[in-house]
Amino acid sequence: MSKQEVILCESLEKSLIHAIERCPHDKLFILTDEHTRRLCLPALENLPEIKEAVSITIGAEDVHKTLETLASVWTALSNQGATRHSLLINLGGGMVTDLGGFAAATFKRGMAYINLPTTLLAMVDASVGGKTGINFNGLKNEIGAFAPASSVLIETDFLRTLDAANFFSGYAEMLKHGLISRTDHWAELLNFDTAHIDYRVLKQLVGQSVQVKEEIVAQDPYEKGIRKALNLGHTVGHAFESLALAENRPVLHGYAVAWGMVCELYLSHLRVGFPKDKMRQTIQFIKENYGIFHFDCKKYEQLYAYMTHDKKNTSGIINFTLLKEIGDICINQTADKETIFEMFDFYRECMGV
């Protein structure tokens, strides 16, 4: 898998011109959702390179991360004369970068694309690392491809217009990166004043977070080994997301990951000895900032069934990423059904469900 260029922008205009020039193209397209077309696209429209771009707009939020939306992007590309030598810019959050990346990876068997993420979640997770895809058959990211963007441009000024819920959604992935890397980075994230955001400090934290992911992806681009570290919180988190979608009460991805980390840190403590004090500190931060995902014991079987569909599984055995200590990662861990149900019990008890 080719290495993508990740740029922490000092000047968005200069960085975007550089990224476009790296990709010779016959036609330029820009994909937005309804929100980023209104809030973010105006910041780019005065650039000569963007004025001639064909704009494609899709519905916002994860409920539109579907085969139908993907087909509408393919149709727009086809009807507007896109070729294998065209270039697509994905301007939006994780749904736009995931779906747009997959559209680019599959149209004419692959065209180049640039990610310009506008949410914290997309900056530190979705747009970096080459994973693209859509939800399908009630399951998160069930269909997709490894297809890295030519460039990913991180412009943290977009975060100034981000609402609190979407800020914390992205921050959950940053907290995960702290847990799988270094104690000082984890502590810095727990102590960051999220009520009075210093955007200069946040930019530094975002840069560190992206670096954690980049270093892991460089070692294991196709998730055969250590890249599974990035799945901490996701085995349970994706099950929570799937249940929420099935019950027509969708939740933001980062919130599901945060709740998933509550479960998987408990499992880490139980199975490989993750320190109880660090587990409690992390869970307290999550309780204070993410609220509670409600479910009762009657949902355990359904959650377990969702977990059996997780992409990391082999031969139907549920695969977890656990931690012995901050930065001490244990991939390819398993747990039986009884232990998983005990984990759900712990979640409901400690979160006050």
Image: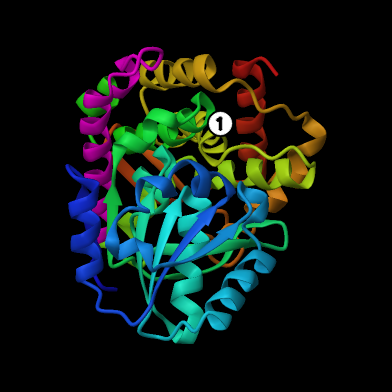
Q: Position of residue 249 (x, y in %)?
A: 74, 37
Task: Find out whether residue 199 is within the magenta segment.
Answer: yes
Taking the image as shown, residue 235 lies to the left or right of residue 157, namely right
Q: How many marks?
A: 1
Q: Secondary structure at mark 1?
A: helix
Main SS type for the magenta part? Answer: helix
Rendered image quadrant of residue 296:
top right
Seen at 24% across and 47% down, the residue is 12
- Residue type marked 1: Trp
In this orientation, does residue 70 appear? yes
Q: Position of residue 329 (x, y in %)?
A: 32, 43
Q: Position of residue 287 (x, y in %)?
A: 53, 17
Taking the image as shown, residue 123 lies to the left or right of residue 66, namely left
Seen at 66% across and 57% down, the residue is 139
In the rendered image of this protein, does residue 162 appear above or below residue 290?
Answer: below
Residue stretch in magenta: 189-218
Seen at 31% across and 55% down, the residue is 226
